[in-house]
Image (cartoon, rainbow, N blue to C red):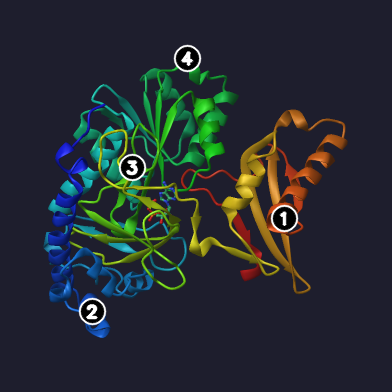
Amino acid sequence: MPIWNPEYECMERAQMRELQLSRLKDQITRAYTHSKHYHAALDAAGVHPGDIHELSDLAKLPFTDKTALRDNYPFGMFTVPMNEIVRVHSSSGTTGKPIVVGYTRADLQIWTEMCARLCSAAGVTADDRVDMTFLYGMFTGGWGMHYAIERIGATIIPAGSGATERHLMMMQDFGTTVFIGTPSYAVYLSEVGEREGIDFAQLPIRLGLFGGEATSVAMRKEIEARMGIRATDNYGLSEVGGPGVAGECEVGVGRHVNEDNFYPEIIDPDTGEVLPEGEVGELVLTTLTKEAMPILRYRTHDLTRLTYEPCACGRTLCRIDPVRTRTDDMLIIRGVNVYPSQVEDILFSVEGVSPHYLIVVDRKSGLDNLEIRLEIDAALFSDRMEPLVEMQERIAEKVQAVLGLRAHIRLVEPGSIERTQGKSKRVLDRRKL
Ligand code: DLL
């Protein structure tokens, strides 16, 4: 399969390290010189751009987190005058002020190339017709991928988020071959399609480019089976540029990080120490080429693992494992640490369970209560209660065995858990209300 930009995507490691070092020095100098925030942060840490002699010197720099971006809302992190900013986006956060990111014309060119690489790595070509279901607007997903599809020369169908019936209609009438969106929206769309009697196997749709949220292996398989497609997973975040940070190739073993533009580190989330290759920890990203808004050592809170092993596709760019867990989405229920991804894995291991669930945590008389609401196949709702009770018990036992917690399992009718057009909501923690 073609590689979009072999010069960078297949660069020798030594050459890549040289390129990264030179770009890193420039990026740190730019941040220190033009950003009040970084100037103060580096001064406070007693480190200056001239102290960077090798890539590992990056560890001397302080981390950047969301607070810095929030405190500098809206444009305080920009390192160019506003008349050089040609686009702004913001994070999808639902509470408080969003995080705003800015792009110069050159940033947009690079961003488009990064996204084009991942589309191409997934197998998109100029012959494809691509249904965009990501939100257009402040979210980076829609526009980032939109321009990449145009750059590749495929046909973009910019329908955007929502209007599922319309997506389905166009999918049939336009001969759509590629779907771009969140995995949860793909599940929803396939459900609606099946209800309308659409047989996806008969449609030309063949490929799904997913991202924006975690997918379990089971959920991915389910989407592939229901829509008759091959799925790839793409990772990114608004703060360092949106989609285009890392994308999965056709080999399907890891997401290639666009290392010529983003320098990845894996750290121990508790100590902040950089971990050796292959260990699971928090991904920290540094932009290497951003003009408008360099970001140094950004703590993503996403847990993953990094490998520099060569990939069978020919790309030398390092790869990250799927991101299943965020350090900050851990729930503490009756003192037990619970990650939503653990619950999802348990649920998917039970037959007849649909991918729609909601974890509800309550506190009654000082005691935490864990409830898992779960949609099950319509066929299982019958006159007889026993199979349902038996299923509830089976799931509760598994939860107990894995998490050491007693959970109340509530089986609910298909369609009763709220569907979202973008990223799904899996947790309702009422204790904070
Ligand atoms: O979700 C950017 C994006 C858009 C990536 C479209 C891929 C495709 P944010 O809204 O800022 O940006 O959310 C970033 O979402 O820190 C992860 O926790 C999560 N996330 C994004 N992609 C994945 C993925 C976009 N493929 C946050 N797997 C990140 C798991 C993901 N989590």
Query: Can residue 331 be seen here?
Result: yes
Residue 433's place in the image compared with 169, above or below, is below
Check disc 1 and give the amino acid type: Glu
Q: Which residue is disc 1 drawn over?
A: 371
Answer with mark 3 or mark 4, whichever residue precedes in sequence: 4
Q: Are marks 3 and 4 in contact (CB under 8 Å)?
A: no
Dot 1: few (<14), some (14–19), or many (≥20) neighbours within 10 Å? some
Disc 4 crowd rating (10 Å Cα; few below 14, some 14-19, many 20+) is few
- In what element is the residue under mark 1? strand
What residue lies at 49% left-to-right and 35% top-to-bottom? Answer: 186
Can you tell which mark lies on residue 247? 3
Looking at the image, is mark 3 or mark 2 earlier in the sequence? 2
Nearer the N terminus, badge 2 or badge 4?
A: 2
- Kind of residue at badge 4: Gln
Q: Amino acid at mark 3?
A: Gly
Calculate the distance from the C-alpha at mark 4 to the C-alpha at mark 1: 40 Å
Name the element at disc 2.
helix
N-terminal of the pair, mark 1 or mark 3, is 3
**Quadrant position of the C terminus in the picture:** bottom right
